[in-house]
Amino acid sequence: MDLTEVEATARAAHAGQTDKAGRPYAEHLQAVAEGVRRRGGDDEQIAAAWLHDAVEDDRLSRAWLEGAALTRRTKDIVLALTKRSGEPPEDYAARVLSTPGALLVKEADLAHNADPARLAVLDEATRARLTAKYARMRALLGLTGDGAAPAR
């Protein structure tokens, strides 16, 4: 699959889904893909950015991912970024760190999730909870700063 096909697949898979602020979920996927591109990510990482929540959100199955015409590296990044039920954040972070290419995608994901403009539309309790959650994950991943500037 080329990036145009991956984007179309991701948009179709997440059609009708909205984020916590009620925005179309595809906007988040596009922002993460663009964040990966700005950080110097390659096409495999950009493809993974488009698909990073598809398996976790049950929009596409693991079986679909395994059978898709994607590189092994792209599939591995998507699987690394797929949170598992009951999984401690430390285990999740360790998997991201041990998967080549995954950290850059997660960095772009966290940067968009923690964007003050996105968080500003949420209620105070949700904003505080998510801000702490994202800061903790950045720390577990060894990321410094706000994630807006390229780390590599």
Image: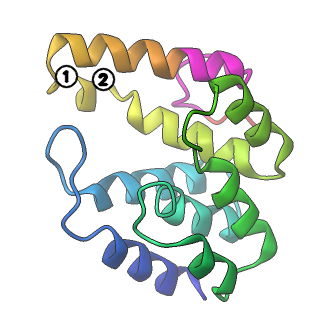
Q: Nearer the viewer, residue 55 or 49?
A: 55
Residue 30, horizontal then vertical, whole percent: 39, 59
Q: Residue at image x 70%, y 50%?
A: 80
List the residue tagged with mark 2. 116
Is 2 above or below relative to 151? below
Q: Is residue 59 part of the magenta span, yes or no?
A: no
Q: Residue at image x 66%, y 86%?
A: 67
Q: Is residue 146 part of the magenta span, yes or no?
A: yes
Disc 2 and disc 1: Cα gap in Å? 6 Å
Asked if residue 42 lies left or right of residue 58, the reply is right
- Specify start and end residues of the magenta stretch as a single range: 136-149
Mark 1: which secondary structure?
loop
Q: Is residue 150 visible in the rendered structure shown here?
A: yes
List the residue tagged with mark 1. 120
Mark 2: which secondary structure?
helix
Asked if residue 127 lies left or right of residue 151, the reply is left
Q: Indicate the quadrant where residue 59 lies.
A: bottom left
Which image quadrant: the C terminus?
Answer: top right
Amino acid identity at mark 2:
Pro
